[in-house]
Amino acid sequence: MKTKQIVLASRPSGTPELSNFNTKEITLPELKEGEILLKGLFYSVDPYMRGKMNDKKSYTPPFKLDEPIDGGVVAEVVESKSGKFGKGDVVMGQLPWQELIITAEKGLKKIDANIAPASYYLGILGMPGLTAYIGFTEIGKPKAGETVVVSGAAGAVGTVVGQIAKLKGCKVIGIAGTDEKIAVMKEKFGYDEGINYKSTKDMNKAIQEHCPDGVDIYFDNVGGEVSDAVMSNLNFHARVPVCGQISLYNSKEVETGPRLQPILVTKSVLMQGFIVSNYQSLFEESSKQMAEWVKEGKLQSTETIIEGFDKLPEALLGLFKGDNTGKMIVKA
Amino acid sequence: MKTKQIVLASRPSGTPELSNFNTKEITLPELKEGEILLKGLFYSVDPYMRGKMNDKKSYTPPFKLDEPIDGGVVAEVVESKSGKFGKGDVVMGQLPWQELIITAEKGLKKIDANIAPASYYLGILGMPGLTAYIGFTEIGKPKAGETVVVSGAAGAVGTVVGQIAKLKGCKVIGIAGTDEKIAVMKEKFGYDEGINYKSTKDMNKAIQEHCPDGVDIYFDNVGGEVSDAVMSNLNFHARVPVCGQISLYNSKEVETGPRLQPILVTKSVLMQGFIVSNYQSLFEESSKQMAEWVKEGKLQSTETIIEGFDKLPEALLGLFKGDNTGKMIVKA
């Protein structure tokens, strides 16, 4: 049986291009005892994938050249030689970018379609949702009445952080790159205010205006000058979960900016970089809470769904241009 | 009765100069019920005082123009109308830079000269010692076998951090500005290695050489390029208590440097700016532990003592030139 896979053809220097990817046709081997044949339904593209395109050890090993990219995938069981999963089951796992996938049971999780659409398990009920919940509550430690600023506020993580902040009784200001995104953030996700960093000339002034009491929690998804402006307006004892730095992922050189330590010292600020996998012990409880909120309608989700397996590289590159509102997903 | 006091004559722009201070002769009023007349014995000069010379709210209010500087002072009771303190008692408190001081009981603490010399209560048994102990243990959370780097390692806080790190079973590398300081750090305070940042051309390489397993805790007293080099060599899950930024205190403009957030994200690093007064609830227990270690000879102290009340401004300015090894104190 033949299938298509998307491999890393070359490592990008700076912003990745379509030429860094290649589509191959491969022949799948016979299914062995304990294995499952899957057909991919939804494929996740995430900012962290940019780091794995470099040949540099980060918190996860890099993608290998000429081997398929892998990421979060929701798939349907086509054939099963496993006692755990049967034909027609919908599962998710960390899987290669292939239309058909042969895999072992390990790491696969059956999805409960009663709670939410299957694609949600790549977003609000998956890694981005957990990242938002755990990063915001464990590091941010929100208290009702506090002022929260979220950068990348219209993204997969940002849309969830904003909603949780509202559930915790905070005032929430989101930063994003288009007026359309800001409208969605305010209308659908309950953000109190939005700042379009592309059309705002003086970000520092904008933060001051929208946060007259200063900033207690800054949930940072983007870095760069947007973050400089927020960092200058932190309150004493502010907390800064550093979740991502999408503005810098394609930088070829080390970027410079205002030194942060003087702010940290004079304001007793906490900054904590994190990846959600540091908090495995909280996954079960946190997933349960998120599923409950989704079921109760307290958390909304938005997805940007691109149709066609072949569009995976394009969708990934789109993240760095801000093409998505909410979770970016490719539907096969 | 007349006495001398040292006041802030003008606010410095950049590095402070002697002309920013003025010595005045004042007449003391009659001692009232509940008050004490003190004669200053030892006066503390500390890096944080630079911030209070600016007309800008930081974590403590600024010094007022034409009013005496205040700081940690060890003094002897000359006359007492308080039931709590008697003539001859040695006390310490946050007091004005005056040779003779009239004060209320509040905030004064009697000193136990059996444990250590009185001047120690301005250093290892006072605020700098508590800063070192609490910042290193509460934020640094040291584990035996970890690699610790301390900047400002020969200073009042740094000399204590290094010794506590050794007591906790860590490998400790100190950064200071002269070979003499490094010799003291290694011989008297047990530092495993020292790096002279003034004579070292490639700090990044020096850190790599001395920390082949990477840096688990960076106790930052200085900031600037010294910190850049250490930050580039942090391990996954490293902790960075940000205690001071003496290299930047006299900057007139916002200094720039390599952005830190990418390091924080890829290595899941914690940075926490702090001042010791955030941890009041730990003072009693921590002071007891420090006193015990000093009594048992497990903690050593070094002081740079300048003689003469009039030398206070000079001693303070000397901190920014690195004139001190250990705690800088003026003896009246």
Image: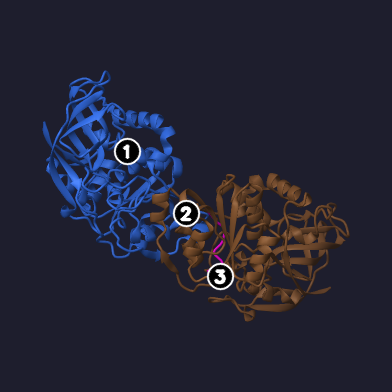
Chain colours: A brown, B blue
Rounded to the nearest angstrom, the CA distance separating label 3 from label 2 is 33 Å
Vertical position of residue A145 compared to residue A303: above or below: above
Indicate the quadrant containing the N terminus of chain B: top left, top right, bottom left or bottom right: top left
Return the mark for residue B127: 1
* Chain on which label 2 sits: A
Give the residue displayed 34% in from the left and 60% down from the top.
B224
Q: Residue furthest right?
A: A87
Q: Amino acid at mark 1?
A: Met
Q: Disc 2 marks which residue?
A: A234
Q: Indicate whether residue A242 is drawn in magenta.
A: yes
Q: Position of residue A247 (x, y in %)?
A: 54, 69
Q: Mark 3, mark 2: which one is toward the viewer?
A: 2
Q: Please report, as a chain letter, where disc 1 is located.
A: B
Instruction: Indicate the amino acid at tag 3.
Output: Asn
Quadrant including the C terminus of chain B:
top left
SS state under label 1 = helix
Q: Nearer the viewer, residue A284 or B316?
A: B316
Q: Residues within 10 Å of mark 1 (few under 14, many from 20)?
A: many
Which dot marks residue A54?
3
Q: Please, what secondary structure does the residue beneath circle 3 have? A: loop
Residue A269 position, x and y percent, is 46, 50
Left of A202 or right of it: where is A246?
right
Q: Is residue A182 visible?
A: yes
- First in sequence, mark 3 or 2: give its number: 3
Q: Is residue A164 left or right of residue B138?
A: right
Magenta region: A241-247
Q: Which secondary structure is most common in the magenta stretch?
A: loop
